[in-house]
């Protein structure tokens, strides 16, 4: 793999990093591959401006799989798309996305094109809508090889079949001539990964890549992504709503709610000792193995209205631990332990709970009590 | 089981008596050898060439019983036939062959008033409540229609009953005047449940009831289902792909693969000591919430074969790590290997055959 990104890697935005830079313990003190600072996305709607992303900051280290997890409407996919400036007017994106020393959000369109789909590739939830139905899978890989690797002819064909093989598609040479509809759901996702990998990206953005797949195929695709991460030394940002996927595939996790990061931590720390009330609520609402047919512990209420957010913590209206302090100003994301950040005022109290399986007495026992 | 011949002019009072909560024993639904195929749309050219009509085997020889008051979970990959089974049971699809017996009546032969009576007793709730609710009818109209069409209440009592239903599913009473699009996903699913409950069913068939909902809201709807089941003595057929939820809710679980049941047992037995290699793989593939428990190799290799071209012998053999010659030649029968634990795998057969003569039947 050629490393064509090293050229501009020196000019990192150190002056911008007033927030603590969270390095994962696995890769100490390497310059981050991607730095996101104060990312905001506003979507004008007839009912008012929707604050989809409200000041997101994070760093991504080389070779790291970062999970961006949240429920629908939390802003996780919007964040991911904003990184590559995929939003169009009237959607407004502000903030900085530093990659290789340059702010992608202010990069001229022609230079952005070489990054987008080149050094940074993206895969989507529904491969059938992301793939071109009238081109064969082979043509779509060749297109990318020509654009970003300047490969053509026999060499390109060779490489394309290598890529299909790499993603675990049997008899790759023959399948290059197939159209996307001739592939099964899992194979389509593999083909989309092969197209994304054609440019030898340093960073793969994956938007719910396994949500539409069966667990057996999801398992295969996640293992494939992790294997490719190791062999190609890429970084991955994995957007998902499935906490199981996060536990099985990510090194570090960022939990989103109401357009903001609520908690970021290493995957073991997050599942072992969550420090934000929302993360605690999310983990406790899942069925517990020992409690067959016992009532679950849901988070009462529903997602916030992003056009009309409450003052203070966005999660406060649904939170069991809410106090007056939560309602005033929105708590910032701050370090609670090395490599573990939380935007919860009560992170100390939660730290003492010491497990994701919290006593049921501290949490609402029935959905029917909630305001839903 | 004697009067399974179509009985004409069944009145609704010929339906079996509703069980009271104290007598929650026995079987509510008995399915025997249910088979359903779908015709494949052939191209004009292949018809001209006289190629044989192909059919998709959606369900093949499915037999199971649903006990009164229990929750029977049905799991499997997409395309395994679990939704087809649910829809065939409520007569949305017409079965090719087999029997479905509901308290001695053959459901597949019911007509007219008797069929309406059956539909009232066995209600289906769909995955996507938004597409199953009429967008131009208020919630009150939706519920009122169900109540009046099935003559559940005299006209004057309908508004009171609507209020009752709304509070039963935890919706505010003013919801009656609003349209489906004004509700969130979780609330719409509650509306779907309320509509099903309007007919005072004995059995709910829930096809991916909470799959479209976020986890925090999912838990609310699951709790509602648990509570209603207790309060109204409902039998629930819970069709889902989320193994964690199925484990939580079900008393028994049936695992399906390519249109057949490959394993059926008490929930604990399925999850703690699965006998069929497919069940074992399916459980291992479900992502664990413990990040320290990761494996490198995928749990099940390969993909579901095309239902147009089901492998000979055991349908799972193409993906099975233990497949041997007999699996290609002979289809394993669903046999009872332990008390209430049925599985269809030759590996289990060969281990036991020496000791127990094959006295156990295939039917459940």
Image (cartoon, grey):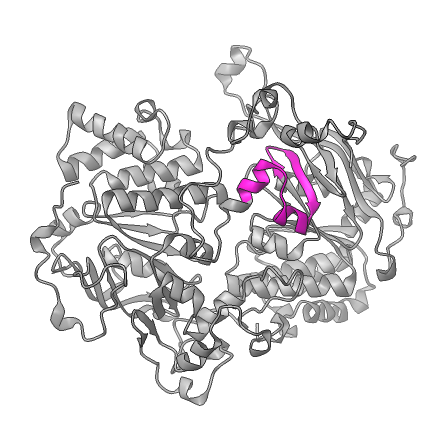
Q: For the view shown, which residue lies furthest in the top direction?
A: B49
Q: Where is residue A63 in the image (x, y as percent from the top left)?
A: 25, 52
Q: In which quarter of the image is residue A297?
A: bottom right
Q: For residue B270: magenta?
A: yes
Q: Which quarter of the rendering shows the N terminus of chain A?
A: top left
Q: Residue at the location (54% across, 66% down)?
A: A285
**Span of residues in magenta:** B256-282
Q: Looking at the picture, does residue A55 appear above or below residue B131?
A: below
Q: For the view shown, which residue lies furthest in the front direction?
A: B355
Q: Which of B79 and B123 is in front in this view?
A: B79
Q: Is residue A72 left or right of residue B79?
A: left
Q: In which quarter of the image is residue A349?
A: bottom left
Instruction: Kindly tell me whether residue B138 is visible in this rendering.
Output: no
Q: Which of B275 and B10 is in front in this view?
A: B275
Q: Nearer the viewer, residue B304 or B139?
A: B304
Q: Quadrant of residue B360?
A: top right
Q: Where is residue B348 in the image (x, y as percent from the top left)?
A: 66, 32
Q: Position of residue A46 (x, y in %)?
A: 37, 67
Q: Residue at the location (79% across, 60% down)?
A: B233
Q: Residue at the location (30% across, 34% down)?
A: A166
Instruction: Kindly tell me whether residue A159 is visible in this rendering.
Output: yes
* Total numbered labels placed on residues in the image: 0
């Amino acid at each position: 793999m050629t490393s064509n990104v090293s050229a501009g890697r020196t000019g990192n935005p150190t002056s911008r990093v007033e927030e603590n830079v969270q390095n994962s313990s696995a890769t100490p003190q390497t310059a981050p591959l991607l730095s996101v600072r104060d990312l905001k996305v506003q979507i004008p709607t007839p009912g008012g401006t929707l604050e989809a992303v409200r000041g997101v900051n994070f760093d991504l280290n080389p070779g790291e799989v970062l999970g961006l997890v949240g429920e629908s409407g939390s802003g996780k996919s919007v964040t991911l798309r904003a990184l590559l400036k995929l939003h169009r007017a009237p959607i407004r994106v502000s903030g900085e996305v530093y990659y290789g020393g340059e702010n992608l959000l202010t990069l001229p369109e022609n230079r952005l094109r070489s990054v987008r789909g080149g050094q940074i590739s993206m895969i989507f939830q529904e491969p059938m809508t992301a793939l071109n139905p009238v081109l064969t899978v082979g043509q779509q890989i060749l297109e990318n090889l020509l654009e970003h690797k300047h490969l053509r002819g026999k060499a390109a064909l060779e490489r394309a079949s290598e890529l299909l093989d790499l993603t675990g598609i049997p008899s790759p040479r023959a399948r290059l001539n197939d159209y996307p509809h001739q592939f099964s759901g899992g194979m389509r996702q593999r083909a989309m990964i092969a197209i994304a990998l054609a440019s030898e990206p340093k960073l793969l953005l994956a938007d719910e890549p396994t949500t539409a797949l069966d667990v057996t195929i999801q398992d295969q695709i996640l293992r494939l992504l992790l294997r490719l991460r190791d062999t190609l030394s890429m970084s991955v940002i994995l957007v998902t709503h499935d906490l199981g996927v996060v536990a099985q595939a990510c090194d570090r996790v960022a939990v989103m709610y109401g357009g903001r990061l609520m908690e970021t931590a290493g995957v073991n720390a997050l599942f072992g000792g969550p420090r934000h009330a929302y993360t605690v609520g999310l983990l406790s609402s899942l069925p517990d193995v020992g409690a067959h047919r016992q009532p679950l512990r849901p988070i009462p209420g529903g997602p916030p209205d992003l056009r009309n957010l409450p003052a203070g913590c966005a999660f406060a209206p649904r939170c069991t631990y809410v106090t007056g302090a939560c309602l005033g100003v929105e708590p910032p994301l701050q370090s609670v332990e090395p490599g573990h950040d939380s935007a919860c005022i009560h992170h100390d109290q939660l730290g003492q709970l010491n497990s994701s399986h919290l006593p049921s007495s501290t949490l609402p026992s029935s959905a029917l009590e909630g305001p839903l | 089981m004697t009067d399974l011949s179509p009985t004409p002019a069944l009145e609704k009072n010929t339906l079996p008596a509703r069980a009271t909560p104290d007598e929650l024993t026995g079987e509510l639904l008995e399915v025997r050898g249910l088979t359903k195929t779908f015709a494949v749309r052939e191209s004009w050219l292949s018809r001209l060439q006289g190629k044989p009509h192909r059919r998709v085997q959606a369900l093949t020889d499915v037999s199971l019983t649903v006990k009164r008051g229990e929750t029977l979970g049905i799991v499997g990959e997409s395309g395994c036939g679990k939704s087809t089974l649910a829809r065939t049971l409520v007569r949305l699809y017409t079965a090719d062959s087999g029997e479905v017996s509901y308290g001695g009546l053959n459901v597949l032969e019911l007509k007219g008033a008797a069929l309406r009576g059956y539909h009232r007793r066995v209600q289906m709730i769909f995955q996507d409540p938004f597409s199953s609710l009429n967008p131009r009818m208020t919630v009150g109209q939706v519920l009122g229609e169900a109540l009046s069409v099935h003559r559940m209440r005299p006209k004057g009592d309908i508004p009171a009953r609507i209020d009752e239903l709304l509070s039963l599913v935890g919706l505010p009473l003013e919801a009656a005047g609003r349209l489906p699009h004004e509700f969130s996903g979780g609330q719409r699913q509650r509306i779907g449940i309320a509509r099903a409950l309007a007919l005072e069913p004995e059995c709910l068939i829930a096809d991916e009831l909470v799959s479209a909902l976020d986890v925090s809201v999912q838990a609310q709807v699951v709790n509602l289902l648990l509570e209603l089941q207790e309060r109204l003595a409902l039998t629930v057929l819970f069709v889902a792909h989320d193994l964690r939820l199925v484990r939580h809710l079900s008393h028994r679980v049936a695992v399906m693969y390519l249109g057949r049941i490959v394993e059926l047992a008490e929930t604990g037995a399925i999850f703690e000591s699965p006998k069929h290699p497919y069940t074992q793989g399916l459980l291992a593939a479900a992502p664990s919430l413990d990040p320290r428990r990761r494996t490198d190799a995928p749990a099940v290799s390969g993909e579901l074969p095309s239902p147009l071209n089901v492998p000979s012998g055991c349908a799972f053999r193409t993906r099975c790590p233990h497949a041997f010659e007999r699996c290609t030649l002979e289809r394993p029968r669903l046999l009872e290997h332990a008390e209430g634990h049925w599985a269809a795998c030759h590996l289990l057969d060969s281990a036991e055959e020496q000791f127990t003569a094959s006295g156990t039947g295939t039917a459940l």
